[in-house]
Structure formats: structure tokens, C-alpha cells
Amino acid sequence: MGDEWILRAEDKHLAGVYQKFPVSIVRGKGALVYDAEGKEYIDCMGGYGVSLVGHCHPRVVEAIRKQSQTLITCHGSFYNDRRAELLEKLVKISPKGLERAFLCNSGTEAVECALKAAIKYTGRSEIISMVRGYHGKTAGSLSATWNPKYRRPFEPLISKNFRFIPYGRLERAEEAITERAAAVILEPIQGEGGVHLPPEGYLEGLREICDDRGVTLIFDEVQTGFGRTGRMWASQHWNVTPDIMCVAKAMGGGLPIGATLGRDEIISSLRTGEHTSTFGGNPLACAAASATIDIILEEDLCGRAESLGRYFMRLLRGMVEEFEVLREVRGLGLMIGLESRLPIRRVLLRALEEGLILLYSGRNVIRFLPPLVIESKHLARAAEILEGIFADEERSLEEGKAPSA
Ligand SMILES: Cc1ncc(COP(=O)(O)O)c(C=O)c1O
């Protein structure tokens, strides 16, 4: 049976908030996924960076199977073995000093808790966020998300206590971050905004300013965390430790789980009942996350992200030299952006036809967030597919048939 019924049912009943691709994914293994008709795709999107250890990693599958037969739910008001085990592993791999965590179910929730903890701890009200920053779409995190397209329709929910400063400009941070600020929140490497790396000295400078003025430094590592950039945490490339770190996406090997990790005194400023979650820290998600951390460490996925990232960026840089329509490659590890001079939606649709799933950042940046277990032959094939597509794009440009969005 084909997949028309799947598309029909979702189009009819699912909230129309996702930019849909006309493909139904029903199965996955490692860096490959399959549609209802069995067509294979190389997954360079990884569910927006979730499937870092690959789809259906056998150790994650086994951890879920075992835990699902033991205990699926256990509210945070009781103690639980899987939760305790995960907390110990998580703190062990986290930057030094971040030793207390709130467990939740998504990136946006991890950010909500971080903002509340910073406000509670400092007793201040202002939050400084970054132009092009992305932190989620619930009220607090949406207030910290820059793109006006996401914020404007929901003005009544948006807090007036948030200020945006340009990412990467230390002199602007120096002016804007005052003793009124509870926190500065940023992604160490901006993802949704187009894969932008911090200029030399930027994160170190922010750390100093925050220390100087008693401001909480929050790193949102929801996308960059768990080895994606070639280190366990992106902040480690610059040796800067935040006061609070938000994580989610890859954490559960595909199951929904997130965490807000912070210094003890900051997270402990949240008192009983002030911030809770019914599902947060449930044993099933904790078992999956525990297995995920083991896989990242034992399969040296950080090292793999670093070497495969270097290899893939070399292929992409070759394409930038070859094709006028391409502007630049940016990234670290397997978090990579390829900027085009033209809108790229057409490229994404062509790639899909050829069995390659890509992600975008805005209109003209292709973002790659593949599983770190991807094989180099798949990356080589991805580059080959893209090369063919961009050759066609240039040809149609030369023939005056400018590609449309
Ligand atoms: C840096 C960052 N923070 C927060 C979020 C929100 O995460 P979620 O969609 O799980 O709520 C995202 C999602 O893309 C993200 O990239």
C-alpha cells in the first residue's frame, strides 16, 4: 500500500504548523530512513538534530524494551533507580560545577526552567538574548527567540523584560549587560539562525562581563550538545563554563527528554513546587538517555563528529569554489551550514527526490545535522547529490531560468 493515506490523514487532522515535505518516513536504521514504499534516504537532518546516535540504535532499543517492561512512569515526587543513574552520568559528563539538574521533556522546557532559575537566583528581571538566537516557542523561550516572525503574532505572551543584542559583538554586550540583568542567554554556536560560530574571544568576554556584573550566563546547548560539534559541549571549544546549560534533542536517543543543568545554588533557588513537570525524569526516557550517553562515550562519537565533519566540510568547500551560487561553509563537527546566494527550498525538494534529507536555516542556508554514526560513504554520496543539483541550478541560471523559492 502506498503512503497517500498517511499524507491525507496528517493534512486533514494535524495542526498545519510544520513546513511539510511530501514524504512519510516509517522506518530508520543508523543514518538511513525509509518511506512507506521502501525508498531509502540518507538522513542529514536527523530529526532536527535528535538522532545523534542514529535511528533505532540497538542499545537504545534494548534499554527502552527492558525499562518498558519494568516501569514506564514514576513522578518526580518519588525516587527512581533509572533517574538516579542518569543524573550521575549526566553530571559526570557536564562542565565542572554544573551539578544539579531539572529534568524535562524538550528544549523549550529546558530554557523555561533556566530563565526562571536565573530570575529567582538573582532577584533581577531583565534577560539579554541574541539577534538570530533561537530558544523555542513557549512563552519564556519565545520571548528569548529573536525572529519576529515567531514572536509578533503572540505579542500578549511576550515579556517586555527581554532585550536583544547582536551576537558576536562584545562591545555591544559590554554596554547592554548591566546590573539589572538576571541572565544572558545564547547558543554558543547559533543553529536555527544559520550556523554562526562565535568570533575569537567572544564567549570568554561574555563570561567576564557576567562575572563582573553578577549576571547568570546561560548556554543553550539544545542543538550543539552531546558531541554534535566534536566536543561533548560546544562551550568546551572555548573553555568557557556557563552557570546554566540547557540540553535536549539528542539526549534521549530519540525519546523526548531535556535538562536544565546548573550550579547548585542557582538551581536550588527554585523551591518546592515552583517548577515541576509530570513527565519530567520518567524512567523510560531516563533509561534511553542513559544508554545514549554510554554510546556517545564508548563509540567516541565526539571524535567521529570531528573527523567526519572535517571530511564533509572539505567536500562542501570544494563545491563553494566550483559554484557561483554558493557563498560559504560554516560549522564545527557535524553541525554545518552551507550558505547559498539563492533560496534553497527547491534544492531541498530535489535532494529528497534523490534520496537525501536536508534541513534549512532560513531561506538560503542548508543545515546538516546528521547522526554522528553516519558513514563517510553516505557523506560522499550526499555531496555528490548536491553537486549534481547545484550544477543544474547554475545551468538554469546561465540559461536565464532563474530558480524560484
Ligand atoms: C538551540 C535551541 N534551543 C531550543 C530549542 C527548542 O527545542 P524543542 O523544539 O525541543 O522545544 C531548539 C530547537 O530547535 C534549539 O535549536
Image: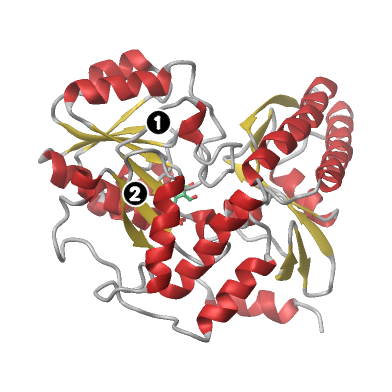
Secondary structure type for disc 2: strand
Q: Residue at x 42, y 44 (%)?
A: 94
Q: Nearer the viewer, residue 131 or 79?
A: 79
- Number of other residues with Cα within 10 Å of mark 2, as a class: few under 14, some 14 to 19, many 20 or more: many
Q: Amino acid at mark 1?
A: Val
Q: Is residue 181 above or below residue 153?
A: above
Looking at the image, residue 4 sits to the left or right of residue 157; the answer is right
Query: Which residue is labeled 1 in the image?
Result: 131
- Name above or below for residue 84 compared with residue 370: below
| Pointer 1 local density, CA inside 10 Å: few below 14, some 14–19, many at least 20 | some
Report whether 200 appears left or right of 386. Answer: left
Q: Amino acid at mark 2?
A: Leu
Residue that badge 2 annotates: 261
Q: Is ligand 1 closer than 8 angstroms to the Cβ of mark 2?
A: no
Residue 181 image position (x, y, % from top left) = 18, 32
**Quick check: 250 left or right of 365?**
left
Pinpoint residue 269: horizontal percent, then vertical percent.
15, 50
